[in-house]
Amino acid sequence: MKVCCEYCQARCRIDEAKIPAAGARVRCPVCQKVFFLDPGEVRAKKDVQEEEASLLPPPDEIENIESSEAAPSIVEESTVEPAAQTTPEPAEPAVPEPVEATVTEPAEPAASEPETGKNGSSRLTGWILSRPLTISVAVTILIEILLVCLWSAGRQPVIQTKDAALSPPIVSASIKNQAIKAITSHSLVGDASIEQQESILTLALLVDQSTPPAYALKMGQQFVASLKTLTGTGESAMPIYQFHLFVYYPNGQEITNRLSTTDDIRDN
């Protein structure tokens, strides 16, 4: 099959078996441009050209007509005026020999690459950094909503108060034993004990019956001072313990005194 390029009008030869019935895109080997070729239209043009050629007279008759027109009779020369000279028509450009054309498939558009996770994370980070006020307001609202939900569900959040944060630690048994061992090493002390209830430390001291009350209270002060040193509250500006001192005699007589944080002794 011979076809003409739509752009350069070059005649190309192409295998008709390679062209589907619906047509195909053909690349011209001369100008390298692609045009659509419909085999049905090519065949229709070919049939029209053949029909027009069949209507023309035979070639020998065409030559006789041309020779008769070219050589008029003498009578006609005497009566007919010479025809005006006309400009010669430009010669038609030479048509190149048909060349083989190639059928090209339409190129599929390249699929766009999906956005990577790195680009998405960088965009999110930039959005957060550009709106700090919006982010802070959103976080505050979320915290308030969470607190309201906990309150409505009966799960009230436990807020540690200042008193709870300053609750005194429990005095260990080893510290108690050291203080008791130090006071019972005195010859006039028979026994001693330490009990703790939150911030109150109760110290009990059993002294000899011959011990004067004033001296017994002095030994009680030594007992309290030793415990303060061991607990680390002796030099504290705000004591966290209250010391209650009780002094007993073997006959059951009791000298009850409360030692305040200023180490003052008040007799009851």
Image: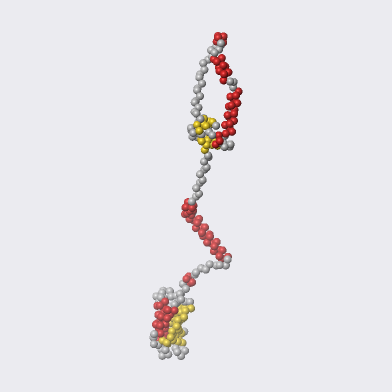
Would you say residue 126 is visible in this rendering?
no
**Residue 78, relative to residue 91: is it above or below?**
above
Which of 31 and 260 lies nearest the eye of the viewer? 31
51, 133: nearer the viewer? 51
Q: Is residue 55 above or below residue 99?
A: above
Residue 229, given in percent of the width and then of the height, sits at: 40, 78
Residue 155 in the image: state x and y as whole percent: 56, 67
**Picture residue at 42% right of the left edge, 87% below the top:** 190
At which x and y percent is residue 261? 43, 78
Does residue 176 lie above or below 43 as drawn?
A: below
| Quarter in which the N terminus is drawn | top right
Report the front residue among 96 and 157.
Answer: 96
Res. 196 in view: yes
Q: Position of residue 21 (x, y in %)?
A: 58, 36
| Residue under the point 51% across and 59% down | 139
- Give whichever of 190, 125 is nearer the camera: 125
